[in-house]
Image (cartoon, rainbow, N blue to C red):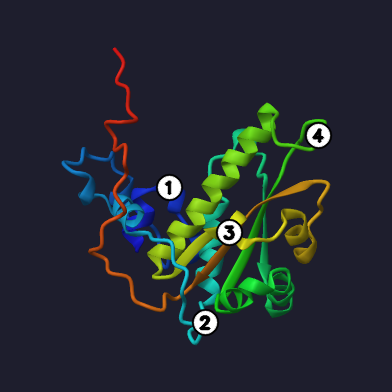
Amino acid sequence: MLALYTLAASFLLPSRLQAPVPAAAHRTPQPRAAADECVVFSTLAQRRSVAKYDSSKPVPANVVTAALEAAILAPNHFLTEPWRFYQCGPETVAKLCALNEDKRAMFEGVPGWIVVTVATEYDDAGLISTKKGLEDHAAVSCAIQNMMLSFSDDGIGSKWMTGALGIAPEDILGAVGADAAAERFMGAVWYGYPAKPLDPESKAPPRKLGLEGVLTSLA
């Protein structure tokens, strides 16, 4: 895993490093011949959303801490640090489960929940539409992906849940004790060991547009 941190500053997690970074790691990066030679790219390509977990295997606390450390390394304009995280214990998870009885069985099969919110400024209607609000919303989205990539690198499955929870955002904020006047719900990150081991050779779902369909090269 050390290679991941020495190749990408956004994944430099102090709690994971057991020894100083070797001097060689500070040399000017050399061009890569292909994306599959990059450890960071491999983590990106291998991450999958996981909905079914092995609840008998608890996720080590240091792995969760590392994922949260990765999250707060996300880019954020003027270091506003707009993210807020609520790591849910059994009592809080029970409150969340009670908010949607139809999905209780699914919810109770999830070993770990982290509710993520954004604390930013809002327009007169209480919506995220100002320049700062949109920048902060984007920053928290980056933080969530950082968290999920860190989990994946440690063999932990995760899934970013929003509307599919079937729970009103304000009810989720109430369940975790968030300040509804200052924060908005960004999602719940489920995490745990996958019920079925992930295949490192599996391919990501193909993108319909591909790179060619979204890239415009300008002179």
Residue type at mark 1 is Ala
Q: Residue at the spot x=77%, y=55% of the render?
A: 170
Residue identified by numbered label 4: 125
Residue at far top of view: 219
Can you give x and y, in whole percent of width and height, for residue 5 in the image?
Answer: 39, 55
**In this rendering, position of residue 20 left or right of residue 102:** left
Residue type at mark 3 is Ala
Residue at far left of view: 33
Q: CA distance from mark 1 to mark 3?
A: 33 Å
**In this rendering, position of residue 184 left or right of residue 163:** right
Residue type at mark 4 is Ala
Residue 164's disc number: 3
Residue 58's disc number: 2
Residue 125 lies in quadrant: top right
Q: CA distance from mark 1 to mark 2?
A: 28 Å
Looking at the image, residue 107 lies above or below residue 66 = below
* Element on which disc 4 rests: loop
Residue identified by numbered label 1: 9
Of tags 1 and 3, which is closer to the observer? Answer: 3
**First along the sequence among labels 3 and 2:** 2
Can you give x and y, in whole percent of width and height, for residue 62 in the image?
Answer: 53, 72
**First along the sequence among labels 2 and 4:** 2
Disc 1 packing (10 Å; few <14; some 14–19; many ≥20) = few
**First along the sequence among labels 3 and 4:** 4
Q: Nearer the viewer, residue 18 or 70?
A: 70
Q: CA distance from mark 4 to mark 1?
A: 38 Å
